[in-house]
Amino acid sequence: MLLTDCHTHTEISPDSSAALSVMCRKAQELGLQAYAVTDHIELCRYYPQGYYQTQPRNEEDFFDYAARWEQSMQQNLLAKALLSDKLHFISGIELGEPNADFSLAESLYQDKRLDFVIASLHELPDKLDFYFLDYQQEDAESLLETYFQILLEISRKDCFDVLGHVTYPLRYIAGEAGIRINMQKYRDMLAECFKAVIQNQKGIELNTSGYRQKYGKPFPDADLLKLYHDLGGRILTLGSDAHTPQDLGGGIAQGTELAKACGFEKICFFLRHEPHFINLS
Ligand SMILES: [Zn+2]
Ligand SMILES: [Zn+2]
């Protein structure tokens, strides 16, 4: 069963070279009912480099996401017009580090060209993306503590529809570096995040990219997905986080089965920030 893919990237994201036309063709071949393009917009580097008076920290430190925002919105509108009779095309964005500027995040969320915003935290203030950190030198537990504190701040704001890959650091800490983490320590903090999201009628995503990575599990895993459901969470989107056409829809069937096993009877996709539910039975 392959219904929706609500987290995907195109070449507008610095870490993808996939043309939207190729991605759209693949989405149709897969028979997706709903397909969201959610290119990266990192709020910690939203303005041109001169604004920050800083040098790029590495070759992947891109600035001026404001320009990418416009490109993305224009590209999404075009695709929406072309695909509207074939599937639900969702004009989305993956808003990284909204904590860098919450008022900007809240105003971007109101952009009328948007259907859907995933809020993600890829890096902590004054740190590089979790991808780049050296976990032999870092204290993984204190990084996670800070990560979940900031995630809780984000979850209380009105600048997103779903929280993205809520256990993202585990991809690197547990998956790549092989450090054992006792997630019981962070369970209460995540429960607070989930409660805030539920109270504000927002949701989380089940990000299936972990199935094809060393980590081997989605973000979040079954235990935390059940916690979200037990707390009353019903708004759940599924996303492959594909950066290539080959990965489009990756892990969605497995993720759908997991959602069912965790008690979800429906999953959803967003249009104009409103959840639309699809029955899983
Ligand atoms: Zn992400
Ligand atoms: Zn992503």
Image (cartoon, rainbow, N blue to C red):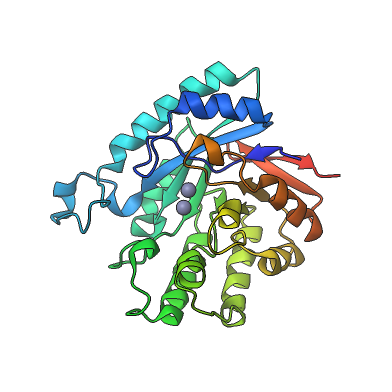
Left/right placement of residue 227 relative to residue 82 reads: right
In this rendering, is residue 202 above or below 222?
above
In this rendering, is residue 112 above or below 201?
above
Left/right placement of residue 90 relative to residue 142 reads: right
Horizontal and vertical percent for residue 68?
A: 33, 36
Q: Depth check: give the residue in front, 87 or 156.
A: 87
In this rendering, is residue 252 above or below 190?
above
Image point (52%, 35%), residue name: 245
Q: In which quarter of the image is the C terminus?
A: top right
Image point (77%, 52%), residue name: 257
In this rendering, is residue 58 above or below 249?
below
Q: Depth check: give the residue in front, 126 or 10.
A: 10
Residue 156 visible in this rendered orientation of the protein: no
Residue 97 visible in this rendered orientation of the protein: yes
How many circles with numbers are drawn on the protein? 0
Image point (13%, 55%), residue name: 53
Residue 15 location, quadrant: top left
Horizontal and vertical percent for residue 87?
A: 65, 25
Left/right placement of residue 152 relative to residue 74 reads: right
Horizontal and vertical percent for residue 160?
A: 52, 49
Q: Quadrant of the N terminus?
A: top right
